[in-house]
Image (spheres, grey):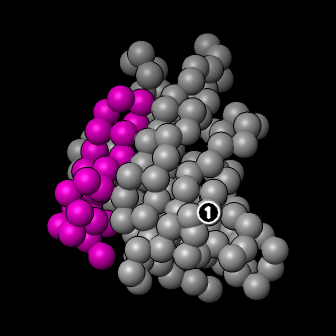
Amino acid sequence: MSAAGENEASHVVLDGTRAAVVTATLEFYHLGADEADWNLDVTLEGPTPRLLVSGTAMTPVLPGPRPMRVAFIDAPEEVLVGGRAGGLTNGGADVFFSVQQIGSGARVEGTVILEWFDFERGSAPFSLELALDAVVSTR
């Protein structure tokens, strides 16, 4: 599913900067367990070409709606805040996106406040908003 082609409302907002979604894949693992793992891999238009987020969700995840806990932000590896490069983390907080089955795919939505950090000068809040349709795959 090409989110940008099929749903013009599919977007990601990285700390106030909106980017259109080109493709999005939501992959689930361990669906037979009480808690499943997930990876959301998003290709974006603009200066940040990729978003890769992972976490966990209680099963059954779909049809939903179901909260998906964010554990890691693997891409982008660095983002600029105030001209300084730093990484993103959940900051040890429980932050969640929502997922719901839409046809054979899924809609992922929500806004979370992440922690942006650089090792020399500390950290700052960093908002990440998702509103996108994704192809669903399972392992």
- Magenta residues? 1-23
Work out which quarter of the rendered image holds the N terminus and state it. bottom left
Residue 25 visible, this angle? no
Helix, strand or loop at mark 1:
strand
Residue 27 picture quarter = bottom right
Q: Is residue 48 visible?
A: yes
- Label 1 packing within 10 angstroms: few (<14), some (14-19), many (20+): some
Which residue carries the number 1 mark? Answer: 66
Q: Is residue 110 above or below residue 40?
A: above
Front position in the image: 121 or 6: 6
Q: Is 20 one of the magenta-colored residues? A: yes
Q: Quadrant of residue 5?
A: bottom left
Q: Position of residue 85 (x, y in %)?
A: 47, 27
Q: Amino acid at mark 1?
A: Arg
Tell me: 116 left or right of 33.
left
Q: Residue at x 65, y 23 (%)?
A: 119
Name the residue: 49% across, 32% down.
Answer: 127
Q: Position of residue 3 (x, y in %)?
A: 28, 65
Q: Does the magenta-highlighted stretch encompass residue 50? A: no
Quadrant of the snapshot with the C terminus: bottom right
**In this view, 21 is above or below 89:** below
Residue drawn at point x = 63 percent, y = 39 percent: 89
Residue at the image position 44 percent from the left and 22 percent from the top: 81
